Image (tube, rainbow, N blue to C red):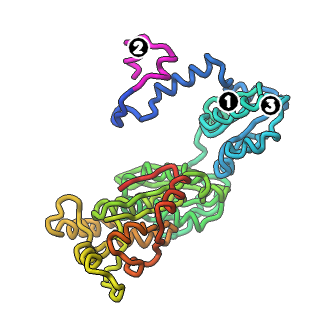
Amino acid sequence: MIATAIKGKLTVDDLAEIEHAYAPPYSSAKDPVNFAGFVAQNILDGLVGAVTWEEVESSDKADLFLLDVRTPAEFATGGMPGATHIPLAELRERIGEVPRDRKIVVYCKVGHIAYNAARVLIAHGFRNVFNLSGGYETWHIATGPQESLAKTTNVHTGETGKVIEMSAVQEKTGKVVEVNACGLQCPGPVMRLKKEMDELQPGEAVAITASDPGFLSDAPSWARATGNIIRDISIEKGIVKAIIEKSGSEATQTPASAGNDKTIIVFSGDLDKVIASFVIANGALAMGRNVTMFFTFWGLNALRKPEKVGGLGKNLIEKAFGWMMPRGSSKLALSRMSMGGMGGTMIRGIMKRKNVASLEEMMASAIRGGANLVACQMSMDLMGIRREELIDGIQVGGVASYLEASEKADNNLFI
């Protein structure tokens, strides 16, 4: 994109309008070059004023009105001193709380939502409105400690559940619970981390070890998503060691209303694809997200009880569907290399040797964790499946049930 812009001697306005082919290996659908054009265009056209964190820090705070437009869950993780919290969704109804005689500095996490809020204020006649460049995240990093306070020398791990004192992690940290998650595969370590963290009080920490190399990136992602604090993480001889402190805000542990729920449409009845669905679902649950899984057509077979249920009054066609389709998750076949069912048996054996939870264990874990498993009523009617044939913990619903959940989600997967 940059090379094209230079070669074509494009202007800032051209960058904002340039069309490009979406190619994931090279860039995202929302290309940063386009956004750079938007930012420059905004400054040149004077649509919304921009202010840096340095300017905010050097200004007289009495002249500023700091407006935090993040969600309540985000605001609970911290904010700028003296800021007034009005979520963007409530701004129009609470516009009277914003003074017109002061310089208004609007901020969100990084600046996008704050820009929309600033445009709302300007549309209501406010003139002295500025968007904080980089948002709260930039201000927090720039004004916070510039070196790590965590000192993790002499950190040792032992038996699961052993409680030790590790004052070197952080002075205010109380107890540190050691957890051995070695042998567990993704998302096992993250799920174990969440389970242990739920038992702790704010300020206490978990020292966890895992043999899954992916945990080196999963642990920081989980900590950021849940608002907890990662004090140290390292990998040595294939073993990941992490120390994570529980945040003081309970709101960060269950951001159910923050618009970041996950919805998954399970259309396929292939073993490998259903496994992938529940790996993602359990990972999302471990990060404190609400998960809705909508099972339709062949995906319904994963929810069937393994034993035959009689006395349902089915007609011949409905009985034929029941005979031809796999009854339950244990009968699902691989999408590739099935080899008459041998492929599924082989992959289950490999999963057991690698300490990966079985599909049935993943399903039970998702239900225990609060995942909402919805069986499509229309598909059940077409395929002759009755509610009595489904496993416990399943809700039967229509497309409206799924759409309601998807409107509260920031990710929707079709598998």
**Disc 2 on helix, strand or loop?**
helix
Q: Are marks 2 and 3 in contact (CB under 8 Å)?
A: no
SS under mark 3: strand
Asked which quadrant contains residue 265, the reply is bottom left
Residue 326 colored magenta? no
Q: CA distance from mark 2 to mark 3?
A: 40 Å
Amino acid type at mark 1: Asn
* Residue at the spot 49% in from the left edge and 66% down from the top edge: 371
Going from N to C along the chain, the mark reached first, 2 or 1, is 2
**Left or right for 245, reference 279:** right
Classed neighbour count for the residue bearing mark 2: other residues with Cα under 10 Å, few (<14), some (14–19), many (≥20)? few
Helix, strand or loop under label 1 = strand
Mark 3 surroundings within 10 Å by alpha-carbon count, few (fewer than 14), some (14 through 19), many (20 or more): some
CB within 8 Å, label 3 to label 1: no
Q: Earlier in the sequence, mark 2 or mark 3?
A: 2
Q: Which residue is mark 2?
A: 6
**In terms of sequence position, does the residue under pointer 3 or pointer 1 come before the other?**
3
Q: Is residue 88 depicted above or below 52 in this figure?
A: below
Give the distance between the C-alpha atoms of the residues marked 2 and 1, in whole angstroms. Answer: 29 Å
Q: CA distance from mark 3 to mark 1?
A: 12 Å
The label shown at residue 277 is none
Q: What residue sits right under mark 3 in the picture? A: 64
Does the residue at mark 2 contact the one at mark 1 (Cβ under 8 Å)? Answer: no
> Badge 1: few (under 14), some or many (20 or more) residues near its Cα, within 10 Å?
many
The nearer-to-camera label among 2 and 3 is 2
Q: Which residues are the magenta region? A: 1-19
In which quadrant is the N terminus drawn? Answer: top left
Residue at figure coordinates x 59%, y 38% from the top left: 147
Q: Which residue is mark 1?
A: 131
Residue 13 is inside the magenta segment: yes
Q: State whether residue 140 appears in this view.
A: no
